[in-house]
Structures are given as structure tokens and as C-alpha cells.
Amino acid sequence: MHRQEKGCFSGWDIGGAHLKVARCDNAGQLLQAIELPCPLWQGKDALRKAIRLALDTLNNELDQQLITMTGELADCFADRATGVSEILACVAEYFPTDRVSVFSKDGWLSQEEARNHWDKVASMNWLASAQLAAAQYPTALLIDCGSTTTDIIVIDKAQPTLSAYDDQGRLESGELLYSGVIRTPLMAVSQQIPFRGKWQSIAAEMFATIGDCWRILDNVNATQINDKSADGKDWQTENCQRRLARMLGTDAGLYSAADWQNVALWFTEQQMQQINNACLQVLSVHSDLDRQAPIIGAGIGRFIAKHIANRLNRPYLDFDTLLGKDETAAAYAPASALALLAQRQFT
């Protein structure tokens, strides 16, 4: 990879719902980190629009561009190999070949190499975060809880220690959990809830997501959310209550704010328990891991990692300690890690 003299480094994490970009200078100082909506399931024009907006926002066209992705799973692509190839074709519309490097489990690849070895590139964004964390904390458990998924990665002897690299294997091992703090449908969290002293079934319908619950509890700010809600309305509390009520087949105004607070507490507790159980599954493979090895929390939902650290009686560290206390960049850990890993390797 060739860098321009005094050039900056931009990490691009291209997902199926968001584009995250983080930028650092040639001294490793993070400059900016942004997240943009990118509903890739609607087609590649969504990605083109997001890339263009990122370039206009960051003015980073001349940076070295570091690419990772999970968007190859979007259902607009016939398979993952096609997804990797078509995403990289979009990237090539904006940057010359010598300015782009693609992150893989075997190091940086050119775009052509990445197409030929798509399985080393597909859904590897979590590995960048783990490598950055391992450089500073040789023993740890990294929990990156985003809007859609949670990655759970053991770091031992200054290396990520993995059961699998691909999504299917990671779903089996517990290292990947399809549960995040915004987009997860409530019907995937619990099918029954306690409501006013009785157990009530909920609708198997996309009336609300877990983001409504975390908003009602004020763990996530509306300004942090770059997703459309289930009904397209904004993320103000009254709208979240209305969506939650639909899951129970009723109207928010028939019950009190305290009732909806209790419903939100139920769903969020069930989600935290799911993530906690996945952590226990992953840790069960590493029973000799130092009891003082910290849990490192990353992603918009890293407050969950902090709760889990308390439950597991482990120290907690925020990913922003790796990033000069940049809380925004810590929410977009893989993009930030890409930029910093490249800067350290190529400066």
C-alpha cells in the first residue's frame, strides 16, 4: 500500500444498513468519525449515495482508503462472493486502485486480490477492532455491540483467539450474536412479557424494535440513531411508546408512562441476558482466561458491555481509551481501527 506524503487514512466499514467512516492523520490522531444511513438491500445506489455524502462531509478523497464490509450479506446480492465484488466495484468508482486497500484475515489486499479471495474479506470488520485492542491489551474480552449485531472476541497472548472466521461458524460459537441495540425486532427478544401482573403474548410483527426500548430508558439518544423506526416516525419517547403498544395489540394512551417503562425494562433485560449468555458460551472455551482480564466495550451499545462486566465481576474498559477518548469513534470501532492499524503499519 502506498501512501501520499503527509496523507491521512480513512477507514470504511460498509454494512448492510450503515456506512461508517473514521479518519486519522499520519500521526495516528483521529480527526473525524461519522455514520451514514446505507440501506444496501435497496441496491447499490444506496451505497453510492452514502459514499458521495461521506466524501462531501469529510473531504477525504485523497486519503489512503481502507475498506472492510459486512454488506455482502445484503439480499440484493445473489451470494456473498457477488456482494464483495459489487461493493468493491462501487468503491472503485470513487478511488484509484493504488489508493485502496481491503482488510482481510491475512492482511491488506488489493481490490483484485480481495475479489479473488472474497472469503478472507467478507464480514471481517470485527477482526480489525480486535487487532487494535490486542495491541494494547494482551488479555481481554472485546464486546462490540452495534445497532444490529454483537461481536464477542477473546484476546489472549495479544492475539484474537477465535473459533471461526465466517459468520456461520461465529453464530455457532457465540462469537457473533444477531442482536443489537437499535434494529433487533422485539419478537426476536421475547415472545411473552409480564404486563400488569399477567403474561401477555406479543405480536409476531415488526411493529417495534429494541431501539424503542433503549430510547424509552434513555440509554440511547435520538441523535445517535441513523435508522428508520418500524413505522417511519422519529425516535421521540411518545413515538417509541406508541410502537411498543402495537406489539401488545393496544394503544399507548390507555396505559401510563410507567407501564411502558416496565415493558422496555423487560425487553432490554432479556436482550442483555442473551448477550451475557453468549459471552459465557465464548468464555467457556477459555476457562483459564485471567479473571482480571478486562471486558472492552465498543459500539453504540457498549453500555451493555459495561453491565456484563459487572455481572461477570471483571474490570471494564471503554474502547475510547484506545482512541484518545473519542466517544463517537468508539461507536464505530471497526472503521476507527482500520484507519489506525493502517497508519501504524504504513507510516
Image (spheres, grey):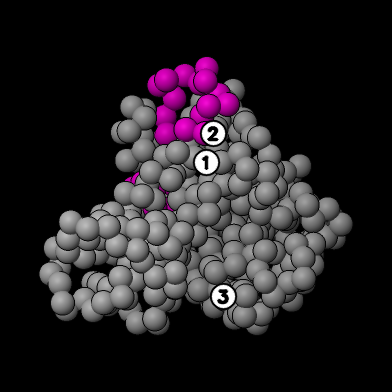
Taking the image as shown, residue 237 lies to the left or right of residue 147, namely: left
Position of 155 relative to 298 (above/below) = above
Residue at (68% x, 44% y) in the render: 169
Residue of label 3: 39
Which of the marked residues, 3 or 2, is nearer the chain's N terminus? 3
Mark 1 vs 2, N-terminal side: 1
Say above or below: 12 vs 56.
Answer: above
What range is drawn magenta here?
Answer: 280-304
* CA distance separating discs 1 and 2: 7 Å
Is 91 in front, or is 299?
Answer: 299
Q: Tell me what residue is drawn at x 52 percent, y 34 percent.
A: 281
User: Residue furthest toward the front?
Assistant: 198
Say whether marks 3 and 2 touch (CB < 8 Å): no
Q: CA distance from mark 3 to mark 2?
A: 31 Å
* Percent x, y of residue 61: 63, 70
* Quadrant in the rendering for residue 15: bottom right
Q: Which residue is located at x 35 percent, y 58 percent?
A: 192
Q: Decide: few, some or many residues near mark 1? Use Cα within 10 Å; few <14, some 14-19, many ≥20.
A: many
Asked if residue 286 lies in the magenta stretch, the reply is yes
Question: In the image, residue 341 lies at what x, y percent?
Answer: 61, 45
Which dot marks residue 152? 1
Contact flag, marks 1 and 2 (Cβ < 8 Å) = yes
Residue 70 located within the stretch drawn in magenta: no
Q: Position of residue 278 (x, y in %)?
A: 49, 40
Residue at the image position 38 percent from the left and 43 percent from the top: 273
Q: Nearer the viewer, mark 1 or mark 2?
A: 2
- Name the residue beneath numbered marker 2: 282
Give the SS element for disc 3. loop
